[in-house]
Structures are given as structure tokens and as C-alpha cells.
Amino acid sequence: MSATLSRATPGGAVRQLLGASRPISWINTAYPFAAAYVMTTGRVDLPLVVGALYFLVPYNLAMYGINDVFDYESDLRNPRKGGVEGVVLDRRWHRLVLVAAAVTNLPFLVYLVAVGTAASTAVLAVSVFAVVAYSAKGLRFKEKPVLDSATSATHFVSPAVFGLALAGAQSSVPVVAAMVAFFLWGMASQTFGAVQDIVADREGGIASVATWLGARRTVRAAMAGYGLSAAVMLLAGWPGALAAVVPLMYVVSIAPFRNLEDAECDRARPGWRRFLWLNLVSGFLITQLLIVIGLGWV
């Protein structure tokens, strides 16, 4: 980490907080909430704005910041840390990040609980618990194979489920299929993402679905997860079933790594970087589909 980033100045603190929140991933949690809420209510109002802002920055600061604090030792051994994929958070910033996460989250959570229902509050509670439980000492769900992938998927699916609950959406086959497919996509994504860290995690004494299965089987499990996500999406019926093509793009993207050996796990890094940018393409395609559905063109 550069001296500029570690300097104990207000500017350095802001840069560390921003880096810890992973700006490239902000949209991945804010968009599902906003899309679910708007598609259900058809309106732009204060709960939408507050919820979108919450899942854009404070939520990500908590999710990734807590992870950076409690993963400090393993991050020091991880060659991919230090860029868009996460900072190596110097010890001097640990307390600041944890305090900032709590302070920025609390006002939003109070408002969202106040304007919500029992159902939406329950979903929000699960969402926040998953954020903390994934990394915090004493819970560390990220070190429990399979539970690590399920918890990570919850991080991204729960904002959408919360948006539906806050908007008072009624359960239906298309909605349930979309959420289940999204969850399977999230599990597959975390599973593949863990491959590149196999060596670093084992050296740091950290367990994961990838250290448990090994690189080859983990990549193939991720491919199966994406394939199952596409199959479930077909249950949404026309035109929602068109979104089944999205998980299949990820199958194609990670297929070249299906025979990867554990010792060469770092070769999966280009695949993970491609995943980060593929998310933007997927978001664009999903947005176009939602617009078409919203306008009643199909």
C-alpha cells in the first residue's frame, strides 16, 4: 500500500474509507433494491431514494470494511489486494472503518425500519446480519464452506428482496424464480471468486468452499451453479425467461478455468476481473428487459 493511502490525514482517511467500500461494486447492491422497488410500485419516492443511497454506499462500507479489518493478515499475503478488488487496510484505519460503518448505517436503518413493515424489517435484519456474520470474529461465515457462498449471495439478493417487501409486492412464480435464480448466481459468483485465493487462504489458515473443493472442482461447481440459475430463470415465463441468457454468459466466461490446479489458482484472476466488468454488461441487459416489461412491449 502506498504511503499516500496510509498517511494519517483527513484526505487519507476518506481515500481509505472509499477504497474499503469497493466503489466498483456499489451498483451491485443498490440496483437490485431500486429495480425491485420501482418495478413493484412504479414510483420514485423518499423510501426509494433513501434505500438506494443506503445500499449504494453505507451497506458496502459495512460489508467490505468489516471484511478488510478481520481479513488483514490474509490480505497481506494476497497479491490481488490493493486495487479495485480491495485495499489492504492498514491497522491504523481499522477502528475508523468500523466506527464509520456503524455511524453511516444506523440512520438509514432507523428510517427504513420506520417506513417499513414487519416483513421488510425481517428481511433487512437478515441482510445486515449476513453482512456482519460473513467476516466478524466469532461468526466468520466466510470460513465455513458452502455457507460462505450462501452468505455472500444473501449480500446481493437481500437488497432486492427488501425492495420487494418494502414495496408490498405479492409473491408470484416469476418473482420467486427471479430471486432464486439471483441467489444461485450469487453463490456461483462467490464460489468462483474464491478460487484465486486458494493459496493465500491456505497460508493464512482460512477455509473456504475453494480450499475445501480445490480449484478444479470449485470452478466446475460455479459453472453448475450458473447453469442451474439459468434453468430456474426459465420458470419465470415469458418475457422474464429471456434473462436466463445472463447466467450462461458467466458459464462461458469461467469455462477456460475448469481444469485449473490449486497451485496455479492465481491464473483465475483474469477471469475474476472479467467477471467484474461482465456484471456491468449483465446489468445493462437486465435493465433493457425491465424497461421492455415495464412499458408493456411484450
Image (spheres, rainbow, N blue to C red):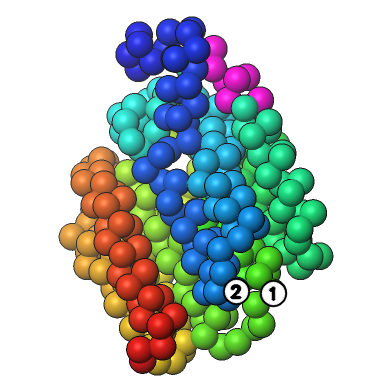
Eye-nearest disc, 2 or 1: 2
- Residue beneath label 2, please? 41
Relative side of 251 to 231, left or right? left
Which type of secondary structure does the marked residue at label 1 adopt?
loop
The secondary structure that most of the magenta stretch takes on is helix
Q: Residue at x 60, y 74 (%)?
A: 41
Q: Residue at x 41, y 70 (%)?
A: 225
User: What segment is highlighted magenta in the picture?
Assistant: 92-99
Q: Quadrant of residue 265?
A: top left
Q: How far is the residue under mark 2 from the one under mark 1? A: 8 Å
Relative side of 142 to 121, left or right? left
Q: Is residue 271 magenta?
A: no
Type of residue at label 2? Thr
Percent of width and height locating residue 201: 43, 36
Percent of width and height locating residue 182: 47, 69
Percent of width and height locating residue 209: 47, 53
Q: Is residue 169 in view from this perspective?
A: yes
Q: Is residue 205 in view from this perspective?
A: no
Q: From what the image shows, is residue 238 above or below residue 121?
A: below
Question: Nearest the camera: 149 or 65?
Answer: 65
Q: Residue at x 57, y 80 (%)?
A: 176
- Residue beneath label 1, please? 168
Q: Residue at x 54, y 17 (%)?
A: 93
* Nearest to N terminus: mark 2 or mark 1: 2
Q: Quadrant of residue 106?
A: top right
